Image (cartoon, rainbow, N blue to C red):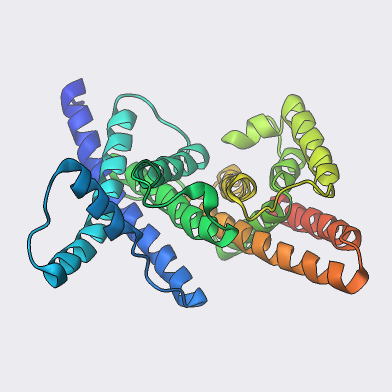
Amino acid sequence: MGYSRPVAIIRGLLNGAMAGAAGTTALNVVSGTDALVRARPASRVPEQLVAAVAGRAGVAVPGGRAERRNRLAALGPLAGTATGVVVGAVAGGLRAAGLRLPGPVGGPLLGAAAMLATDGPLALTRVSDPRTWSAADWTADVLPHLAYGVATHAALVRLERGSPVAAPTAPLARPSTLVRAAALGAASGARSSAGTAALALTSRPTDAGAAARIGSRPGTTVAGLLAAGEAVVDKLPMVPSRLGAPGLVPRLALGSTSAATMARRDGEDPALPALVGMAGAAGAAVLGVRARAAAARRLGSDRPGAVAEDVLAAALAWFGARRR
């Protein structure tokens, strides 16, 4: 039996809140893994933000100096969890109201919304200025939030089916599909349009999901032009680093969406391939910069490394996008 619209929206809000909690867990796992790998100290920005907001609101955190510091340290992560739950609840309410975006679009958009909800207050309170962040800072911020978005969207879709353990409509991605997702992600990390262009060349208008639009004649034409243009622009000296936000965010988003589109086209659940594709894009973006810098130091020019990266990106994209 169907629900009335108000009841459906309330149910959507509750589902979204639970999905947001799952997404926050994914965010914390990715962020914690990054801290472990790079041996970076825990960030004090969350507690500084709480202190700044409390100060502007005229709310005093009780206790002496040590007690106040401890309470702020506890409030920082709690505020971050609350943000993740609220963003998820809003997404669930919008989805219940009829705004249903496919995973390759909805996941990255949710991640961007969570980033805005976190980074916006940092800039407004002047706790931190995102314009001064380094490439490593942006990577540590973008990747966990994209993981949040993909995980929240996937959890929300599962909850909508009536039960968190309801069987998915498509089988889980096979290991070979995850390998191909990693290849598409790595290709997108090297050349942001490579994965999409390869999908356009290997997909048909009769395929399922976004692959049908990408594989159409207009989709193939646009994807090919973008890939050719990027191959030229990438070698210009004025192009900014791909590890900055303008270069990294599209690579992570396209790595995730191309992997998810490939999996859906081949009849498998796209959630895990989307995460693998995003991770592959992040790794390839970082390794590509380092490899090209090393090649430039050895050869005296960046051009040979750039051309080699073109070839590698094309090979990875072809391997990831080819049909089963």
Is residue 206 shown to the viewer in this render?
no
Q: Residue furthest left?
A: 63
Number of marks in the rendered image: 0
Q: Residue furthest top?
A: 5
Pick the quarter of the image with the N terminus. Answer: top left
Give the x, y percent position of residue 272.
49, 56
Is residue 320 shown to the viewer in this render?
yes
Q: Could you say which is closer to the camera, residue 181 or residue 168?
A: 181
Give the x, y percent position of residue 119.
40, 46
Q: Could you say which is closer to the camera, residue 194 or residue 265?
A: 194
Position of 306 compared to 10: left or right? Answer: right
**Image quadrant assignment for residue 287:** bottom right
Position of 189 compared to 108: left or right? Answer: right
Position of 23 compared to 196: left or right? Answer: left
Q: Which residue appears at 14% of the width and 65% of the height? A: 68
Give the x, y percent position of residue 64.
9, 68
**Image quadrant assignment for residue 153:** top left
Position of 34 compared to 118: left or right? Answer: right
Give the x, y percent position of residue 56.
21, 43
- 193 lies above or below 127: above
- 51 lies above or below 37: above
Q: Which residue appears at 30% of the width and 24% of the height? A: 97
Q: Which residue appears at 43% of the width and 52% of the height? A: 145
